[in-house]
Image (cartoon, rainbow, N blue to C red):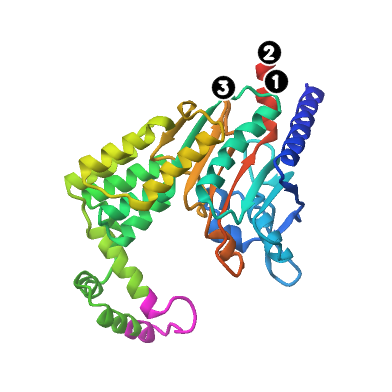
């Protein structure tokens, strides 16, 4: 059994190598040890909990490579390579796992610098499907779901929610349970419990929106308590965060706005019907999604032009992926009955500049899970 599984994995990895070459993605290798800060800052709570952390001789935080996206971007920046550029990879990643192995093969493509975002997004999904098919897996048996974080953020903005609530909802995007809890708190004012220990004077200043007086009051209390001003958050930062928390706690969506948000999140249809569903929602709710909906429409057109049948993919307005650096389109491809996706990815336009690039670089990519692909191939042969 082990020999057959190893043979299936080699077959998949060989097929992926040939596919990457055929689409002009150059193979890149990156070190197993990576700086930990970029992951801790951008990867999302689900992945942060699974990272193997260590320290270098200089005390710098390091980790075993938990994925390839960040290392590939760092490698690109260090090399000063020109754009656009497509990088392919295939290697081992390391994630803590209480119920199974902590080392996994991962492969994929990172597409940097293509300014035609609709074209690059469409090509990314099409290439992920084609890569799986190139390994002998029947793509017609697979489930592909697409989401769009930028569209979700545009819809939230159209509702006029306080910025704190928008950020809270964005953080829960793609986490069904967390999103339900946030919506319940919006409907009932359930966020107020976190302010139980707040001094009444500070609470009143925050409710009144008196930022200057609130900053002075916090500064006085810090000085009285002997807290250093040059370490940690400043009184200004504390006051701004406190006002945001109070706004979150005091906000209750009226029924109409809450129904609009739930109507948006309930959209779940084949991708070929998605624009009509979004257009209908906008007309009924008086919402203008502007450029975000135009970009969504252009991506569908690009995906169709790449030869992908939109009726075979699903759009879920509430679908997201558990990585904080995504900024737009996200997707996953799964095999029925298999735990975990065969492929997943999305757009992450802010990440490369955060990692040190001198300019904002459009970026999109996808990761593949060769072990799951080999298992799917084996199941299909039975």
Identify the residue position indicated by label 2 in the image. Answer: 382
Residue 168's tag is none
Q: Farthest top residue?
A: 382
Which one is nearer the viewer's eye here, 8 or 81? 81
Structural crowding at the residue carrying mark 2, measured as other residues with C-alpha within 10 Å and reported as few (<14), some (14–19) or many (≥20): few
Is residue 379 visible in the rendered structure shown here?
yes
Give whichever of discs 1 and 3 has the lower sequence position.
Answer: 3
Percent across and percent down for residue 133 are 66, 27
Percent across and percent down for residue 175 are 43, 43
| 276 to 258, vertically: above or below | above
Which one is nearer the viewer's eye here, 166 or 55? 166
Structural crowding at the residue carrying mark 1, measured as other residues with C-alpha within 10 Å and reported as few (<14), some (14–19) or many (≥20): some
For label 2, the SS is loop
Residue at x 44% of width, y 76% of height? 233
CB contact under 8 Å: marks 1 and 2: yes
| 145 to 256, vertically: above or below | above
Percent across and percent down for residue 287 are 25, 48
Residue at x 70% of width, y 20% of height? 378
Seen in the image, is 69 located left or right of residue 174? right
Is residue 259 visible in the rendered structure shown here?
no
For label 3, the SS is helix
Give the spatial CA distance, label 1 vs label 3.
Answer: 16 Å
Percent across and percent down for residue 364 are 57, 49
Q: What stretch is highlighted in magenta?
A: 220-237
Q: In which quarter of the image is residue 255?
A: top left
Identify the residue position indicated by label 1 in the image. Answer: 378
Residue 139 in the magenta stretch? The answer is no
Single out the mark in the foreground, 2 or 3. Answer: 3
């Amino acid at each position: 059994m082990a020999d057959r599984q190893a043979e299936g994995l080699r077959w998949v990895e060989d097929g992926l190598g040939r596919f990457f070459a055929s689409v002009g993605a150059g193979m890149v290798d990156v070190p197993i040890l990576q700086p930990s800060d970029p992951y801790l800052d951008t990867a999302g709570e689900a992945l942060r909990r699974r990272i193997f952390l260590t320290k270098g001789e200089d005390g710098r935080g390091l980790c075993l490579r938990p994925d390839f996206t960040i290392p590939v971007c760092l490698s690109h920046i260090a090399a000063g390579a020109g754009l656009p550029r497509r990088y392919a990879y295939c290697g081992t990643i390391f994630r803590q796992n209480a119920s199974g192995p902590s080392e996994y093969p991962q492969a994929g493509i990172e597409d940097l610098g293509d300014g035609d975002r609709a074209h690059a997004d469409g090509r990314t999904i099409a290439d992920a499907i084609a890569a799986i098919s190139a390994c002998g897996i029947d793509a017609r048996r697979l489930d592909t779901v697409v989401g769009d974080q930028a569209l979700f953020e545009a819809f939230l903005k159209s509702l006029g929610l306080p910025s704190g609530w928008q950020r809270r909802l964005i953080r829960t995007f793609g986490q069904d349970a967390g999103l339900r809890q946030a919506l319940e708190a919006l409907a009932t004012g359930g966020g107020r419990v976190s302010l139980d220990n707040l001094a009444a004077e500070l609470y009143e200043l925050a409710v009144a929106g008196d930022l200057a007086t609130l900053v002075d009051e916090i500064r006085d209390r810090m000085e009285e308590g002997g807290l250093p001003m040059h370490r940690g958050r400043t009184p200004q930062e504390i006051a701004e965060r406190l006002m945001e928390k109070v706004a979150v706690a005091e906000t209750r969506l009226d029924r109409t706005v809450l129904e609009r948000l739930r109507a948006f999140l309930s959209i779940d249809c084949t991708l070929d019907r998605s624009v009509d569903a979004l257009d209908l929602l906008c007309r009924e709710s008086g919402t203008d999604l502007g450029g975000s909906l135009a970009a969504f429409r252009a991506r569908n057109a690009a995906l169709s032009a790449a030869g992908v049948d939109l009726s075979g993919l699903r759009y879920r307005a509430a679908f997201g992926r558990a990585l904080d650096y995504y900024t737009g389109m996200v997707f996953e491809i799964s095999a029925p009955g298999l735990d975990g996706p065969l492929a997943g990815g999305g757009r992450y336009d802010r990440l490369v500049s955060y990692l040190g690039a001198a300019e904002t670089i459009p970026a999109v990519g996808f990761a593949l899970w060769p072990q799951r692909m080999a298992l799917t191939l084996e199941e299909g042969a039975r």
